[in-house]
Image (cartoon, rainbow, N blue to C red):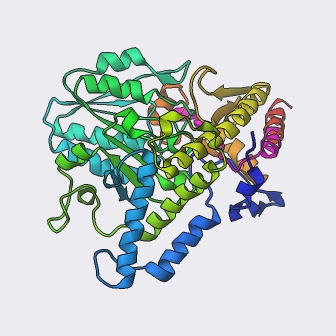
Amino acid sequence: MNFDINGIRCQFPSLNREINGFPVVYFDSPGGTQTPQRVMDKMVDYMINHNANSGGVFATTVENDEIILNARKTFADFFGCNWDEVAFGENSTAINFKLSQAIARDLKPGDEILITDIDHDANRSPWEILSEKGIVIKSVKVNTQTLTLDLEDYQSKLSANTKVVAFNYGSNAVGTISDAKMLIGLAKSTGAITVVDAVHYALHGVLDVKDLDVDFLFCSAYKFFGPHIGILYSKKERMEVLKTLKISAQKNNAPDKFETGTLNHEAIAGAAEAIEFIADIGSKHHGHLTASHSNNTPRRNNIICGMKAFEDYELPLADYFKDELRKIKGLKLYCPPREQLCTSTISFRLENIHPLEVAKRLAQQGIFVWAGSFYVVELMRALDLSEKGGMVRIGLAPYNTREEIERTLKAIKEIAADDFN
Ligand SMILES: Cc1ncc(COP(=O)(O)O)c(C=O)c1O
């Protein structure tokens, strides 16, 4: 595969950083990716040349409105939807709180909401607090062997009383990719509203909201090369009837009715540029296109090819990484079985060494990884890791290299070996 890793790396200025004389290895992508120069340039350009509030008649306000509309169109290509189905917000957690509160205005005591044990707290707590209104919250169990959702449990908890089903597309803790289309199909058969957290998945696979037939799906631009904002896809007919929390002066049409107050305009400009970055990479990898893509916009096809190019580059690296980690004495991997779709995120524990200690020792050598529960509380409880520091998590991104993996393997082997000496 002709993946121009050097051409990609040189676009990320932060990759030049050193710690204690070591070039930094950014394996923290599930917490957030690095940012290409062009994204930062767009944000600076916005602040210098187009900085204004929306809806006026002078040059900068008109340009500002164009930038925001263009960003909606760009994200429409990212999601596979129409531009008026794209809303911007503070981050995914805040978006989901606002969404859940709006949906709850039409719910009554006894109605049920189905969430899952593999989810980030951002897609649990906003629903769980609705129990204050007498709404019943049920949670789908995880199979602790395969680290996948327990489908039987899911089906047994779905009923005519289920009004909302909320789950994540990709697990930010262990990388499991859920069969979102199948789960949504089952939820629809009971008439439930579906809400998908695509925050982890969005860096690792193509989003196609029309194919999924999902009602709401959110993600955060800082997980895919952009700044810190969240983006919501809402099916138009759902957003039209949603009783959003809005001030009376706010427009009542989609997507404005979801966007409270002044938006983060410069971040929206940067987030759209992050998608253009993905599309530009995709424009060099058109091998993935088939006749089924012929109705897409050229930019959507480039985005699809960009995401697939990332996957083709990262997944073999992740497989190699996992195979080598498996050979380390005392190391336990937490990843789904080979036949299960998953992202390039790899979690593990070393026997007798606290995950935070492993992360600290790697950090001393400039290798940045996360340790802990990653806000995936129920999964950690099911695995009996809540009181034991959770896991060490390595997250690949398309700017990581085989050399970085070798360096990290060597460092982990040394840490593991120390434990046995
Ligand atoms: C799967 C998942 N969902 C939700 C969130 C919360 O996103 P945000 O930080 O944008 O609120 C995260 C953040 O790490 C995540 O990984």
Q: Nearer the viewer, residue 161 or 52?
A: 52
Rendering quarter of residue 59: bottom left
Q: Is residue 291 visible?
A: yes
Q: Is residue 392 visible?
A: no
| Residue under the image location 55 percent in, 58 percent down | 276
Residue 43 position within the rendered picture, expressed as x and y whole percent measured from the top left: 52, 71
| Residue under the image location 18 percent in, 59 percent down | 252
Rendering quarter of residue 353: top right
Residue 134 position within the rendered picture, expressed as x and y whole percent measured from the top left: 17, 35
Q: Nearer the viewer, residue 278 or 21?
A: 278
Tell me if 364 is positioned left or right of 240 in this view.
Answer: right
Rendering quarter of residue 211: top left
Q: Is residue 226 above or below residue 82?
A: below
| Residue under the image location 50 percent in, 82 percent down | 48
Which image quarter holds the C terminus?
top right
Q: Nearer the viewer, residue 328 or 278?
A: 278
Examine the structure image and report whether residue 410 is included in the region drawn in magenta: no
Which image quarter holds the N terminus?
top right
Examine the structure image and report whether residue 393 is included in the region drawn in magenta: yes
Residue 157 position within the rendered picture, expressed as x and y whole percent measured from the top left: 30, 20
Residue interval drawn in magenta: 386-409
Residue 66 position within the rendered picture, expressed as x and y whole percent measured from the top left: 38, 70
| Residue under the image location 72 percent in, 59 percent down | 15
Tell me if 89 is positioned left or right of 249 in this view.
Answer: right
Residue extending farthest bottom: 58
